[in-house]
Image: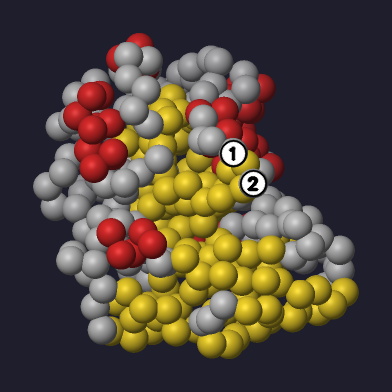
């Protein structure tokens, strides 16, 4: 049976510029009630062997290639790239993919020079089918901040072009201090117990959901986020789960008020009250449907609480 596992997909340790040892990162992730993490130190895999010493939570090993024109996330690749001499970005992404890895774009609209040289994505990718996921929500900030809002719009525009790219949250986790919205994470839809391989498969297949704590269970005749369903009139059973939000209620409060479904061109295919029940949609051919949950954050209305990967036709 599939269920949603809370994970943090962008983490750093003392092996690059983080303040955590690998053990401290894992212990802190457990304290944050996370089921899995991705270890993504900058330009190195030196922390990987330490991660093998601990089995407290699932650890998917990766790297964040830090360049002057963007930060490239690579998960479970069998080969390193030369991130200091990239003249053809598609070729380098293809190396990661062909060696068995996943490619992610980290915080594409982060402030660049002089605040964070290379933090903003400036590479001219010709073939976005090489990209598995995009970090459209970063650093614990609300999804509707300018940088995250722009990343969300870019991701939707790529869905419009037919690319199947998973959306992710990335805290870009370096230390415990200064964290915002500490329950926010990427949920991965996994069958059975969580493992690094199942984490990788969930990201590859678009089975992701970004949330501050309340998330949506969605079912359409046994299919869900990341799957392809037939066009025509379809009924989606939706159940809201606020159990993670309850774990962090002393830090911030959440309430869900409406569900919105986004489709081709950023159009709203459905909008209604956030409640358990069925949503009926007439699905168009060769399209996508993204489910969003809107509500209140600390009493303030009109906040995006959760967003799923796409369901395709």
Is residue 276 visible in the rendered image? The answer is yes
The residue under label 2 is 1
Give the x, y percent position of residue 75.
Answer: 50, 29
For label 1, the crowd category at 10 Å Cα-Cα, with few meaning under 14, some 14 to 19 and many 20 or more, is few
Give the x, y percent position of residue 180.
Answer: 22, 58
Q: Which mark is residue 230?
A: none
State which quadrant residue 223 falls in: bottom right
Q: Which residue occupies 25% across, 55% down?
A: 182
Is residue 135 visible in the rendered image? The answer is no
Q: Which residue occupies 67% across, 53% down?
A: 226
Point out the image quarter for the C terminus: bottom right
Q: Is residue 269 above or below residue 47?
A: below
Badge 1 vs badge 2, beta-carbon distance below 8 Å: yes
State which quadrant residue 239 falls in: bottom right
Give the CA distance from mark 1 to mark 2: 6 Å
Q: Is residue 64 above or below residue 185?
A: above
| SS for callout 2 | loop
- The one of 208 and 148 positioned closer to us in this rendering: 208
- The one of 120 and 224 positioned closer to us in this rendering: 224
Give the x, y percent position of residue 23.
Answer: 23, 24
The residue under label 1 is 192
Give the x, y percent position of residue 206.
Answer: 62, 48
- Sequence-wise first label, 1 or 2: 2
Q: Which residue occupies 56% across, 50% down?
A: 3
- The one of 102 and 235 positioned closer to us in this rendering: 235
């Amino acid at each position: 049976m599939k269920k949603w596992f809370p994970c943090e997909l962008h983490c750093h340790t003392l092996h690059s510029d983080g303040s955590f040892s690998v053990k401290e990162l894992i212990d802190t992730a457990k304290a944050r009630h996370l089921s899995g993490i991705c270890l993504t130190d900058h330009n190195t895999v030196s922390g990987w062997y330490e991660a093998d010493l601990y089995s407290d939570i699932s650890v998917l090993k990766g790297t964040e290639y830090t360049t002057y024109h963007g930060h490239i996330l690579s998960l479970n690749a069998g080969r390193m790239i030369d991130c200091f001499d990239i003249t053809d970005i598609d070729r380098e992404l293809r190396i990661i993919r062909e060696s068995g890895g996943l490619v992610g774009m980290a915080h594409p609209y982060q402030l660049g020079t002089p605040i964070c040289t290379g933090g903003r994505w400036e590479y001219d990718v010709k073939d976005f089918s090489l990209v598995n996921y995009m970090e459209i929500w970063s650093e614990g900030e609300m999804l509707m901040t300018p940088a995250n809002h722009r990343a969300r719009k870019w991701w939707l525009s790529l869905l419009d072009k037919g690319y199947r790219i998973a959306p992710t949250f990335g805290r870009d986790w370096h230390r415990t201090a200064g964290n915002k919205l500490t329950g926010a994470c990427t949920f991965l839809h996994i069958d059975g117990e969580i493992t690094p391989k199942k984490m990788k498969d969930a990201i590859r297949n678009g089975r992701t959901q970004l949330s501050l704590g309340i998330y949506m269970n969605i079912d359409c005749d046994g299919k869900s986020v990341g799957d392809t369903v037939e066009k025509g009139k379809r009924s989606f059973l939706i159940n809201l789960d606020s159990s993670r939000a309850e774990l962090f209620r002393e830090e911030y409060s959440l309430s869900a008020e409406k569900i919105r479904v986004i489709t081709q061109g950023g159009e709203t295919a459905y909008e209604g009250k956030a409640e358990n029940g069925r949503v009926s949609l007439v699905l168009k051919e060769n399209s996508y449907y993204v489910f969003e949950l809107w509500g209140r954050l600390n009493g303030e209305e009109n906040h995006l609480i959760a967003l799923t990967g796409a369901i395709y036709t």
